[in-house]
Image (tube, coloured by chain):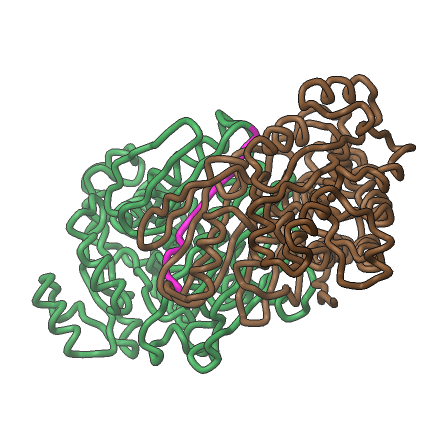
Chain colours: A green, B brown
């Protein structure tokens, strides 16, 4: 439901969903929010039906406690029909990019999950917020710091919540690493290395098109390594230095193929990181601490991540990462709490990403300024 | 033996050892050199009897096929007496730093193995060459590119061979990695990460004294990571970028505590590396190739290194690394062949090390110029 902020104007201007109506019937806004979050399923409009939506997110709804797929937005009518049949979505809940604003009056939709090419994240986040919907937007948040700020502003203005699809921030092994970093059971972190790469296929896909993707490997998968350094330290990088290489200039004419970068954090932690679209087998997060280490390899996969510390293997159950991420956001909406993967979090990654590109461009270290 | 270069002046000016005399008796210089190397043991003067000499190198002589410990150089008479008894070294083959030049007339000594603090490498390499001895010098070769050049020049002028103690260049797992890199069985290398760190103890040791050590973790153990990138690619880095941190400013007042750095190679390989004196558990070499990977962890230990490739574990017998290194140099001397760990090899590492320090200083990328 679109949780009002106890403000008349907002209350009147936002669509009141069936969920909210039910919530009111059960005792109104002031009923204990945890009760609400235990029982409610928010309606989600999925925007963009590419492979991530098809293979990961749609199945995740079956495992979600607090989200249900109630609408889709697609530019391909055939896909719309197929999804409608497969997931029982009513024909009047299928939208395209021209009819997107009609979501405003779709009472089955509480939040919009944006799974579009990167360059469309800003526009559709803003349009969704203006349509009165909360927004969960896939990473990278946008193609520029400026776009990130616009998105945050739009969601704030519309009094809608914004979260970025940082699934690893809910993955139990990553949470365990963060816990160890905070409680210093193995001592303070001294150094981190993190890298994520894969060999990209089809040379004609949008990920290799600068206009659609904004950037290459760094924006797509390097961001996992970058963010892991940020949430492990709990700090923002101060100085960033980077290098780039292209060994396939034709395929990677528009976007970065391989990048390595260094980050310095206020507490003295150094991180050395890498990303590539041109090889497999790099999917790792290591932190070296005063008295030990934590090691994830693989670290950033949808399934099968593995954690070992200097004290031994840590095997944890990992529920569906997309269901967990959606449910966490739904709870933030239902309980009117801030999301830990907020727009501000996405903005901080983008500040670092812009610094990395700037360092490559200038061949100098770049001071990261918030 | 000090193998002459078939040049009268050299022949007359160099000391002719018992080994050479025996070689002459067996058929002179023109007998098949492999026969000579199979049978001969060259006499070694060990210079500096610190922990590496005590714990690694002295025992390695027991396993050496081509080297025997015939003399020692130490500033501590008690150590001299102890070593003399333990290893059966005659009292007239114990030298100190004032009597060092007397090595020139010690016919039991063919080569000098320098295991002194870094800042003394250049001086004693040059003095040993001038005394007519071949020189095996521990890494790092010296504290500066200028010193490296002087050492190379001195050994060339004296027609003596110079090798640097790069034991990993003879370690079977590393050789296997190099073989895979060259035969491209797993495709071309795309990226390398390498790191070597340990938590240094006694704050008063010479390694933390800038005048004696020249630098800190980078010079001492980071050099392994640096060199591994060079021999895996078979190339020299073109652009280097680095960052440094000090979390214990008192202990590391004079030398570097932790450094991360990036290197770009002509074929497009990127390397990201790290070193530290302030934590354990980082001792690794990974190469990511077009179709797989090689992974050593630990990578740079005296014993117990482990290699896995994308095709599986590779378990190889590892003979004593110091005996192997000494024997390889002895064979170069006996067969008058160039050493693959020559002074030029040490110089190339030092060029990169100076670039790393310069990048830290200038906060900019540094072009490595030979």
Q: Is residue B94 among what the camera can see?
A: yes
Position of B35 with respect to B149 (left or right) is left
| Range of magenta residues | A279-290
Image point (76%, 63%), residue name: B6
Q: Up-down: is B294 above or below A252?
A: above
In the rendered image, residue B317, in percent from the top left (x then y), is placed at 42, 41
Asked whether residue A289 is drawn in magenta, I would say: yes
B356 lies above or below B83: below
Residue drawn 29% across the image and 32% down it: A32
Where in the figure is residue A365, as x and y percent of width and height? Answer: 68, 59
Compared with A230, B52 (above or below) is above
Residue closest to the eye, B53 or B84: B84
**In the image, what residue occupies the spot 86% across and 60% down?**
B9
Of residues B177 and A291, the one drawn nearer to the viewer in this rendering: B177
In this picture, is A98 found above or below B122? Answer: below
Which part of the image, by quadrant, shows the C terminus of chain B?
bottom right
Q: Which percent across, then down, holds residue A121?
A: 40, 67
Q: Quadrant of residue B290?
A: bottom left
- Left or right: A317 in relation to B275: left
Total number of numbered discs in the rendering? 0
Indicate yes or no whether the magenta region holds residue B13: no
For the residue pair B366 and A72, the one nearer the viewer reads as B366
């Amino acid at each position: 439901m679109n949780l009002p902020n106890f403000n008349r104007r907002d209350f009147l201007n936002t669509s009141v969903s069936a969920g909210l109506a039910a919530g009111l019937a059960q005792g109104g806004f002031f009923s204990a929010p945890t009760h609400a979050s235990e029982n409610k399923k928010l309606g989600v409009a999925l925007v963009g039906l590419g492979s991530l939506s098809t293979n990961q997110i749609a199945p995740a709804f079956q495992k979600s406690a607090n989200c249900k797929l109630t609408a889709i937005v697609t530019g391909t009518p055939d896909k719309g029909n197929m999804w409608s049949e497969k997931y029982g979505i009513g024909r009047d809940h299928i939208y395209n990019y021209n009819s997107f604003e009609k979501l405003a009056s779709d009472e089955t939709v509480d939040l919009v999950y944006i799974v579009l090419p990167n360059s469309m994240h800003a526009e559709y986040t803003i349009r969704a917020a203006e349509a009165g919907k909360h927004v969960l937007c896939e990473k990278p948040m946008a193609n520029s710091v400026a776009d990130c700020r616009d998105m945050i502003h739009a969601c704030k203005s519309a009094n809608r919540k914004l979260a970025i699809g940082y699934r690893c921030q809910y993955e139990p092994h990553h949470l365990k690493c963060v816990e160890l970093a905070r409680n210093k059971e193995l001592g303070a972190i001294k150094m981190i290395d993190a890298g994520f790469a894969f060999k990209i296929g089809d040379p004609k896909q949008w990920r290799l098109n600068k206009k659609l993707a904004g950037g290459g490997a760094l924006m797509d998968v390097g961001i996992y390594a970058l963010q892991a350094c940020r949430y492990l330290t709990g700090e923002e990088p101060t100085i960033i230095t980077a290098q780039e290489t292209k060994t396939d200039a034709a395929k990677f004419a528009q976007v970065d193929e391989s990048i390595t970068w260094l980050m310095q954090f206020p507490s003295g932690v150094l991180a050395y990181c890498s990303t590539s679209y041109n090889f497999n087998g790099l999917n790792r997060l290591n932190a070296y601490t005063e008295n030990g280490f934590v090691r994830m390899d693989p670290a950033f996969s949808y399934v099968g991540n593995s954690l070992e510390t200097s004290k031994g293997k840590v095997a944890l159950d990992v529920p569906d990462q997309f269901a967990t991420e959606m449910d966490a956001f739904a709870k933030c909406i239902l309980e009117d709490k801030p999301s830990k993967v907020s727009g501000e979090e996405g903005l901080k990654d983008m500040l670092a990403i812009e610094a990395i590109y700037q360092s490559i461009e200038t061949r100098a270290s770049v001071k990261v300024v918030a």
